[in-house]
Every structure is written in C-alpha cells, then in structure tokens.
Image (tube, helix red, strand yellow):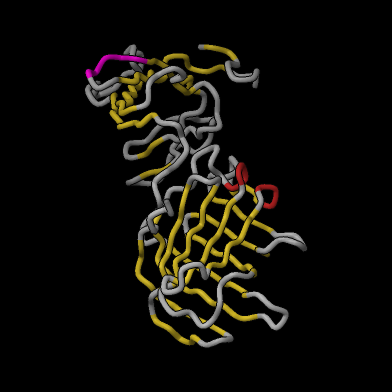
C-alpha cells in the first residue's frame, strides 16, 4: 500500500490495482502508467442490484463496474513527446495476481487511442426537437431552441468544455447564405453540473448584457434561450444549428421538420430528423 499519493489526502492506496500500457502499431510498449486504488464499489451495474455502495464496506459484484473519475489522481500515462497517431491502451487489473479470482484470464482490456493536437473532437448530431424564432419590436430575433440526441452523446473533453473556452451558437437559413444568428456564450457564465463538475453537463446563466439568457448542454441534448441579429424572417430553407464548445466540440441539428408557422414575425418548427454537422467553411 502507498499512503496519500495524490495531494496528501490521508488514506492508503492499493499500489498494484491496475497497470496501463500504451502500445504502438507493432504492439511494443511505448509508455506505462498505473492506477492506485482506494475505494472499490459498485458504481454501476448491468445486471443485479449494487451490493457495495460505501467505501466503508468495499467490493465489486458480478455484473457491476467501478468508476474512478478523470479528476482523481494517480491514474494516468504520461504521453508527452510521443508522436501523433494510433495507439492501443491495455489496462490490466491485478497484474501481480494478488487477488484470488475464479477466472484469471479476463483481467485485461484493450482500447483504441488516437494521439493528436487536441484541437477538435468528433461532431455530435442532434435531432431537431423544436425551434422558435420571433422578430422583436425593438429589433433583432428571439430564439428558443431544444435539440435532443437519438442516442447518448459525448460531453466535451477536458480543455474543450464551455467553462474553459466558452461556446458559440449559430443558427443559419440554408436557403439564404449569410443569414445567420451568431451568439457568444462566454466561459465565465457557464458552470459544470454533477460531481465532479462537468460530469453531468453544463449550464449557462446569462447576465444583463449577454445575448443568451440561459442554455444547457447535457445528456438530454441542448437547450437555449437567446436573442440577436443577423437572421431575417421568414426563413426560406432548413435551419442549421451549430453549437461549438471551446472552439473544438460541435453539436448540430437541422430543423427541416414540421413547420407550424413561418412569416415575417414568427417561425416554429418541430420534429426534425437527426442531422450531421455541415462542413466547416474553408
């Protein structure tokens, strides 16, 4: 056991809980790391009911898994200096065979890993649940947006969260190039949800001078209430929505679904199918 390895937080950690190996294309180990375990419990279960739910009485039930969040220390591989490219991460639990098990052959798992410059992440397609645009008497356009995923979506990786780099929201008329409502949601107005912060999503609370009054990005999709200029009503084509977190992670919807109203004062569309993000402008 190793005492207080991550910031001196006052308890012992099991040193050889797991080893991490990063393999290159030839399956050679190019970097190594590990995980110092402290609390092993049933974080989630595919089958059955959790039996171990407290660090005071630890264990892991069949069909259950233990989750150590990325924010916790002592579980990493140092990859600084390695060239960009495709790698394989091999995680081996109980590598020294110190824990008695009925089956010792299933203690390793392999995962594909891509090392790059971290400037972008895969896009996420959202279904166009509902969008409303209204012309304001004082000028500009008021937006109410709700877009939900057909399946689970990935939240932004660390460094690309809206709490780090803010976010932008663009709503464009596909039939009128240049007719776009562009909105900025600054980082200081965002807060991370869940424990640790950000694991359950992000919430935006706008101030008096912010274009958006509220927004939320989580496992249920994207919601926003904003107002700005640049998009004229009525809308001639589909509405493309692109929400970008930290200049890296894009969430997109295309509202070409059922149209309830589209005139110079108001537009409402609902039930649009999930759509991929448009190609970035050159």
When the figure is inspected, residue 174 is found, relative to residue 12, above or below; the finding is below
When the figure is inspected, residue 257 is found, relative to residue 3, above or below; the finding is below
Magenta stretch: helix, strand or loop mostly: loop
Q: Residue at x 40, y 66 (%)?
A: 127
Point out residue 10 in the picture as x, y percentages from the top left corner.
64, 19
**The image quarter in which residue 265 lies:** bottom right
Q: Nearer the viewer, residue 185 or 90?
A: 185
Point out residue 206 in the picture as x, y percentages from the top left corner.
70, 60
Q: Residue at x 46, y 29 (%)?
A: 40
Identify the magenta region: 26-30
Tally the numbered discs. Answer: 0
Point out residue 146 in the picture as x, y percentages from the top left corner.
51, 68
When the figure is inspected, residue 182 is found, relative to residue 7, above or below; the finding is below
In this view, the residue farthest toward the right is: 208
Quick check: 20 left or right of 218? left
In the image, residue 27 lies in the stretch drawn in magenta? yes
In the image, residue 121 lies in the stretch drawn in magenta? no
Quick check: 109 left or right of 219? left
Point out residue 93 in the picture as x, y percentages from the top left corner.
35, 22
Quick check: 39 left or right of 108? right
């Amino acid at each position: 056991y190793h005492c207080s390895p991550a910031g001196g937080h006052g308890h012992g950690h099991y040193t050889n809980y797991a080893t991490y190996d990063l393999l290159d294309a030839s399956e050679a180990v190019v970097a190594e790391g590990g995980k110092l375990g402290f609390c092993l419990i049933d974080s989630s279960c595919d089958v059955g009911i959790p039996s171990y739910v407290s660090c005071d009485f630890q264990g892991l039930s069949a069909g259950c898994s233990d989750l150590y969040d990325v924010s916790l220390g002592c579980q990493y591989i140092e990859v600084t200096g390695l060239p960009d490219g495709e790698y394989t991460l091999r995680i081996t639990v109980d590598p020294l065979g110190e824990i008695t098990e009925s089956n010792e052959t299933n203690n390793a798992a392999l995962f594909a890993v891509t090392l790059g410059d971290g400037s972008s992440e895969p896009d996420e397609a959202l279904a166009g649940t509902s969008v409303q645009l209204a012309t304001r008497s004082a000028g500009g356009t008021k937006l109410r947006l709700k877009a939900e995923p057909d399946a689970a979506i990935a939240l932004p990786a660390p460094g690309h969260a809206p709490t780090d780099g803010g976010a932008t929201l663009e709503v464009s008329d596909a039939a009128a190039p240049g007719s776009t409502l562009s909105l900025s949601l600054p980082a200081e107005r965002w807060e991370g949800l869940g424990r640790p912060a950000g694991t359950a999503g992000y919430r935006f609370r706008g101030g008096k001078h912010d274009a958006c009054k509220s927004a939320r990005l989580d496992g249920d999709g994207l919601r926003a209430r904003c107002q700005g200029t640049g998009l004229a009503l009525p809308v001639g084509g589909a509405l493309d929505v692109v929400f970008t977190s930290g200049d890296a992670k894009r969430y997109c919807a295309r509202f070409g679904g059922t149209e309830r109203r589209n005139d110079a004062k108001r537009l409402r569309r609902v039930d649009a199918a999930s759509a991929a993000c448009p190609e970035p402008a050159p």
